[in-house]
Amino acid sequence: MSVHAPATPAPPAARVLGLVKTFGTATALAGISAALPPARIIGLVGPDGAGKTTLIRLLAGLMQPTAGTLEVLGSTPRAEGGITQAQTGYMPQRFGLYEDLSVLDNLTLYANLRALDAATRRQRFAQLLSFTDLGSFTERLAGNLSGGMKQKLGLACALLGRPRLLLLDEPGVGVDPLSRRELWRMVNDLVAGGVTVLWSTAYLEEAERCAHIWLLDGGRLLYEGAPARLSERVRGRVFRRRVAAGQARQTAESELAREAVLDAVIQGASVRVVAKPGAAGEFHAGVYEAVAPRLEDAYVELLGGARKGESLLARGWPTGAPADTAAAGGAAAVKADGVLVRAAGLTRRFGDFVAADNVGFEVHAGEIYGLLGPNGAGKSTTFRMLCGLLMPSGGAASVAGVNLSRAASRARARLGYMAQKFSLYGDLSVAQNLDYFADIYGLQRAVKRERVRSMVEMFELAPLLHSNASLLPLGFKQRLALACATLHAPAVLFLDEPTSGVDPLMRREFWHHINALTTRGVAVVVTTHFMEEAEYCDRIGLIWRGRKIAEGTPDELKERVRSPALAEPTLEDAFIALIQGEAA
Amino acid sequence: MSDTLTRLRLWWQQLAAIMIKEGKQVVRDPSSWIIAVVLPLTFLFLFGFGISLDTTVVRIAMVREDGGRDALAFAAALTNSRWFLVVAATDRRSAERALQDQSVKAVIIIPAEFGRRLNAQNTTAQVQVLVDGAEPNTANYVHGYVQAIWNGFLAARGREQGAAPAAAVSVEVRYWYNANAVSRWFLIPGSMTVIMTLLGTLLTSLVIAREYERGTLEALYATPLTRGQILIGKTLPYFLLAMVSMLVCVLTALLLFKLPLRGSFLALGLVSAVFLVPALGQGLLISVTMRTQMAAAQLGLMTGYMPAMMLSGFLFDIHSMPPWLQAITLAIPARYMNVSLQTVFLAGDLWSVLIPNMLFMLAVGALFFGLTWRRLHKRVD
């Protein structure tokens, strides 16, 4: 994917100098100076709230800087009358499509807005429709496309005017690995043709593939340059420790507790460890295998290493769960076999369309089960049936021994649910959110007071108790959402893309708590599009076209697709190969 | 020269693109059909059939405590009146009960002394009228009708006795332009004003807020489109929609409700088009100010629909409002539209009335569009 630089150094596609943007008292960008090298993919990396979207909007001429200067393709971007908008393509989050118009209507609209003449338009349409494989869907309403197809259409619309600079705001969010890989292929073709692409992402595995990255955090530029150069800082200090089945979580915890360890994460049946500078000697070859550094290792070091210490959430977990008193059944309902979630022949039809077809699996106490699959595969449908949000057309689902179709509300009292965009009440304060969720879960007054108090203490929410939830920093929103979902000490926790858009440190903190809860016997079901997150799962069920096409531990899945051509498959390789194998 | 032509063609291509897009969205969105066709017709039918400010026949209870000739004659006058349906009540208590349970709207009591007092010198005969004050409108009518019947009764009695009529001058009211004083005739043009306000202001108040909410505005702003193109492209389709809807209203009014059209279609079309300038301008101003459709719709209703109902002279007479409220109505385009429509329908093409009204509407419209222009930056910060 590397692109050779031209012989004479071309001018940068964009340059910013001392760029500051504030909104009222909030600072989105706190003085950024950098240049975009031309004809490359530049990754704009950082967590939500780092200032990525603001920077992209400034480059697209949609905002005016508070201070500093910026230059795009040799001139100052202006919303009107400037040349930049004619030469840049911009794809906002959610792709900027008119969902009530057809694919062709959307393309025609943007073609006309960019004033393409009829001949050029025909030619571009033909090119872009074949480029995006949308040729057979031109009459479909954009709102009825899958996430991956919307993304491709959004890209096609942004490409109509043959831009020299393409600005993509989180094109990978909510899109499955298959579609993401296709998008990469398309963007690489563009770069080969001389286009400069700015690709914003919260995911370091995406950033790692870029030729150049801008790493933002809190409105500041932490790093600018090739990702490999950043990874070099931790070279020689990254190790892999293989562990016995079922030992990964304890091993990761104990590794992280060591003074010499900066970071430890679970990767299937092994633990990846990053040593502190100068401490590499403590990791002996017999146990620890040295591996190549990755961007994420360096990033975590750059931000000061992973948070250490025991998860207070697990320590404060009531032994006799309060939900037992709230809902009849309780612990007694859990079968002796330890199965907390059981899906048997789950089927859901919408008219003629079978969204979930005979899906079955079991999740045991203390187990983390991942539901993976492309957009529109039936993952969310299955998930919703398990949470009691959707009635199955056939089959049965039970949670903690309670059948969801017979006693949905009793089952729901035994489960906690955390949605991807932290479904908190933004206008309520932290304390009011906690109170509210405690009340709707029917906690008794004394239990409620105790649980709320301990949540506030262990998530360090005390100073923010009276702030509105919508104004919290992202990390605290995540904590509050987790607190609200676990107030009633549920036996089963459902997580729907829980760390979407969250940076690696916050993701570690989150999984630190989740891992600790499994030691208390909580069963966890999680959906995700990100393979780093899928590595935390004990077992994974892969859903495609409504059916479960594969199940196993992350390592088993990788093993199934190992071949001479793919000697060291990643989980993403496994994901793609398994689906392609099924499709063939 | 050809360069200018090319630039003009491209400008038009971009403008047409955004208009076609808006048009398609209107056609595909069932709610805009409801607002453009169903709502106007509902309104017209409501004001045409359902609501009437004319009182037809009022049920009243009558208690006659005097058995004399004069009392009988007055009772007969009441009973024979085409305004009342008289229910005889045996005593005051049962009449009051009928008033309480709303089976009658008023009670008329002819007291025991009626005949004696009428014929005696130095006394005046009395009739008691009890009306339901909760319905002041009806109460006024009843009062007026009883007064009229009383006068008629006295006059007839005088003629019978050979005396000269009590009054040498009698007042005879003639209603110009609406000879039968049918309230429908001024309610329907008035409801057209309300409909046009709803269409013009409510629909356009959503156009930019909706794109902001759905995240498409950024993509639109990131194209080389100009402010002027956005403004025109977002206004014209709704202008056409409102004009079509106005045509539907006018045809319904003429064919179904038999309203007269004493002016010309030309004047009607001109007045409507001019009114849409402030109505659409107000909607756009709201739309560029508000960032959610919910807030925009609420503001549209509050500042468009409510004043058009209350302060346009449609339901409440402007001249009987307190002066400060009258001053406020000067800024409300619906007020000028109301007068203009009533003029065209009921009086004719009185340009001396129409032109000043249209100028006022244009002035308010220019203000709204000017403010919109200033607020509409192609930026999202």
Image (cartoon, coloured by chain):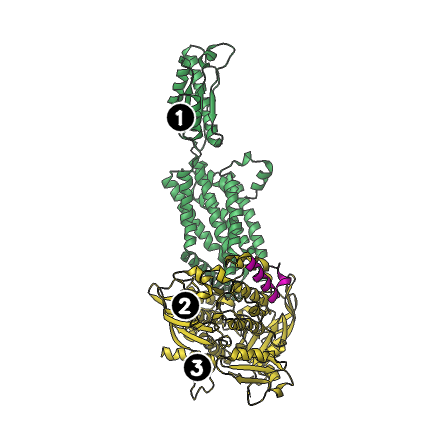
Chain colours: A yellow, B green
The residue indicated by pointer 2 is: A382
The residue indicated by pointer 3 is: A556
Subunit of label 3:
A
Q: Nearer the viewer, residue A252 or A128?
A: A252
Residue type at mark 2 is Thr
Q: Which residues are magenta?
A: A446-469
| Residue A20 position in % (x across, y down) | 65, 68
Secondary structure under the numbered disc 2 in the rendered image: helix
Is most of the magenta stretch helix, strand or loop?
helix
Q: Quadrant of residue A140?
A: bottom left
Q: Are marks 1 and 2 in contact (CB under 8 Å)?
A: no
Q: Are marks 3 and 2 in contact (CB under 8 Å)?
A: no
The residue indicated by pointer 1 is: B84
In the rendered image of this protein, does residue B52 appear above or below residue A56? above
Q: CA distance from mark 1 to mark 2?
A: 70 Å
In the rendered image of this protein, does residue A41 appear above or below residue B80? below
N-terminal of the two: label 3 or label 2? 2
Does A455 appear in magenta? yes
Mark 1 vs mark 2: in front: 2
Residue type at mark 3 is Glu
Locate residue B197 relative to residue B49 in the image: left or right.
Answer: right
Q: CA distance from mark 3 to mark 1?
A: 92 Å
Subunit of label 1:
B
Structural crowding at the residue carrying mark 3, measured as other residues with C-alpha within 10 Å and reported as few (<14), some (14–19) or many (≥20): some
Secondary structure under the numbered disc 1 in the rendered image: strand
